[in-house]
Amino acid sequence: MGIKRRAFLIGGAAIVGGGLFAVYWGDSSARKRAVELTAKGKDGSFLSWVKISEDDTVTVYSPHIDFGQGSHTALAQMVAEELDADWSKVVVEHAPADPSFANSALGRGFMADMSGQPSIVAALPASFISMAARSMNLQITGGSSAVRFTGQSGMRVAGAAAREALIAEAAERLKVPASELTTLDSRVIHEKTSTSLRYGKLAQAAAARSLNSDVKLKNRKDFRYIGQGVHRLDIPAKVDGSATYGIDFTLPDMRVATIMMAPVRGGKLTSVDTAPALAINGVEKVIKLDDAVIVIAKGYWQATKGMQALSPQFSDGGHGSLSTASIYAAQDKLNASGEKLVAPADGKLLTADYKAPFLHQAMMEPFAMTAHHKDGRLDMWGGLQDPLGTRMMMAEIAGLDAAKVMFHPMIMGGGFGRRFPPYSQIIGQLTKIAMQVPYPVKLIWSREQDVQHGAYRPQVAARLQGVTGKKRMAAWSSDYAQNDDAAAEGTVPYAIPNFEARHHEYISNQVNAYWRSVNASQHGFFNESFVDELAHAEGEDPYTFRRNHLKAGSRPLLVLDTVAQRAGWGAPLPEGHARGIAMVESFGTIVAEVVEASLKEDGTPKVHKAWAVVDCGTTVNPLNAAAQIEGGLIMGLSSAIGEQITLDKGAVVESNFGDYPVMKLADAPEIDVHFIESGAKMGGIGEPGLPPAAPALANALFALTGKRIRQLPILAQAKA
Amino acid sequence: MPIETTVNGKAVSIDAEPDTPLLWALREDLGLTGTKFGCGIAACGACSVHVNGEITRSCSVPVSEVAGKSVTTIEGLKGADGTLHKVQQAWINAQVPQCGYCQSGQIMAAVALIQKTGKPSAAQVDEAMTNICRCGTYPRIRKAILAATGQAAASVEGAA
């Protein structure tokens, strides 16, 4: 797997009731800090990476939050694999927001693999960047990174180092050579004498031993847990209502608040008469922020009624003339400035303008977090993608020393990129109100505020030019206008002699945010639709055209061929049905999808079946990995068909699920997911299933109607 | 005036203003947080409960309307001995939930559908299951409903 394990330090510590094993990136101060905190920890509540307790329970501390992607279970599988743990006694907990748990493996992963998502690093708050630069410590979930970086470089190494120490300890106690010992189901076994020792009995002493920093990891053929579709550890609590999300957290004497923000991002609160809200039964306080008004009441309903009684006035921050159309117009102008391709006499030039709207993550749990400022200390509970970054922001906003601030991560009702601290406004809002009241307060955003004050996928326009001849692509250029450079996502896997992508910076009043699969979704739609156009221009079948531009024996070719084969590409279809194909590599994973679609009587698309073939190197949990691909594909179809965030007079028009239509069960296709276990460097799984869905559908609809879809969502264009 | 009603088989008295949505009375007055807030306009179904056996989006029903009625929430689905309802078990077997936030509502909708139809057809599932799941667990929800009603294999591949 190419992991430079020598660079890691392995640390252990004997603790009350067990042993602690951790992996650090060459930073002995972090190890010292973890041991310090461990000593202070009560009931073993604060420990690092892997804890083995006297009763054999193996606790895995994940520096990543799990908002449904199942990475906690996968990370536990990776520890259990190398440790030879008894799976029935493995549990996973969120690591606390402490630098000792910062994820060096993730930092190194991004630095080493710039095809990942390096811009995530740039999105960190300023106070955190310097710290990250010093130690490359991160506690982020994003970039489909948990398993491929933390799991490969952290969890497996910790498990293997712990196992080696347990064997060494057992060898000493049994007075036998370590080479005669084997491990299985949390026991060290000496077969010759039919004796064995439980890990729980050995852990405390084993953790106090000097640990090996250069452990040998298992070979694929010896895997017992990696590659198995074990059931997710978090699911039982998610079917009986007992799972506790941020919105469910409660404290004695807690009040509930809700918020109304300036409709135009960048606008300010200019005036509000607070009296009408205060007259509502249960309302206790109205707080004015720079750009919002907050009502605090006994409960959410009373806070909502209080808010409805108010008529706050907001300025538009100078963005009152901004609209979806004005943004596209400005972007088109930028793109038109790009260099023009010229076709040779025997070639063809095709030029097409593509557009993709702002999109909302629409996580099912709106922002809802609780904070309490008491005795100079600020605590916050909720779900965000970077607990440590959140803590740093809280300290900065509250003007408190970081030691007096703690963020307690909880499970999340979805995220999809919305819960990155730098643009999670709720951190600042809640910190500010908590500092003003003596009681704990939970701030809940209404769905309308959630939709209208989102951190959207950037709206992007692109001008694509392609030169073809003799059924081959000779030149390709892409001019695209958006906030950030999407160089990594703007590429295609095809062999094209001349390929160029030019970024034109366009900045609206919206933040530059991440949406599941980041820029791979817009650019995947542009590029994979345009490849289809070029195939059509050359009179070639879109699957054949693609494969003729892929290297024999390459991973993308196998992925493409496999999806075509599974989907029966070219086989007859029912009347009124057509297929579309697309392939996008993102986050180190190659995914090709085929969609079979028709049009309903009202002209809206209906997807009957979809096929996805995935090469992410190795799947840790195929059952959950398939779920991630299914979910990504459905989110891709949903957004392609009906989702858009539009601006009018600088403000967001859509406000709830009525006008932001998320796909429902009746429209979700049956999905065939297949993995190619290539053994290549491990790629991500949470995001890569999404990008091919929109172009595959658009290409199917072209095959059906002859009408090329160059702007999303499809329904808005159909009605226009 | 407190509102007298029955929740999960127990008589309760809820001291909330009559126009308070049932959702918030359940969550904040009774501490039953398994029922979720999603949209507040009965569009997403995360707040689905049963009122006298009928599937109901509790964010849009005033608590005063359930006076004298019987409300069942996700917390009330298990048997008296703690055994999971067959739909809950089917959800585990099919590994349905991802983030899990909408699943209380999805399960309540599925239970109501099965109580009404016995063995729902694919068309009945499509028509009844209108709750939003942003994670896209729909294919597995379909499988779980079919499995819970003996119309498909009980479990997806993989060890428990």
Image (cartoon, coloured by chain):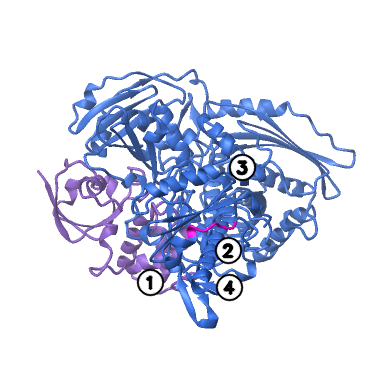
Q: Is residue A382 magenta?
A: no
Query: What is the spatial separation of the Cα atoms under label 4 and label 3, in whole angstroms?
Result: 46 Å
Residues beneath discs 4 and 1 located on the same chain: no
Q: What residue would you read off at disc 4?
A: A177
Mark 4 Cα shell of 10 Å, populated few (<14), some (14-19), many (≥20): few
Identify which residue is drawn at 64% across, 70% down: A221
Q: Which chain does the residue under circle 3 lie in?
A: A
Circle 1: residue type: Thr
Three-letter amino acid code at the position of disc 3: Gln
Q: Which chain is blue?
A: A
What element does badge 4 sit on? loop
The residue under label 2 is which amino acid type? Asp
Q: Which mark is residue A117?
A: 3
Q: Which chain is purple?
A: B
Q: Secondary structure at mark 1?
A: loop
The image quadrant where one finds the C terminus of chain A is top right
User: Which chain letter matches label 1?
Assistant: B
Compute the Cα span from label 1 to label 2: 23 Å
Badge 3 marks a residue whose secondary structure is loop
Q: What residue is pinned by disc 1?
A: B149
Residue A412 appears in the picture as rendered:
no
The kind of secondary structure element at disc 2 is: strand
Q: Is residue A584 left or right of residue B128?
A: right
Q: Nearer the viewer, mark 2 or mark 3?
A: 3
Instruction: Between residue A36 and residue A636, name the one nearer to us.
Output: A36
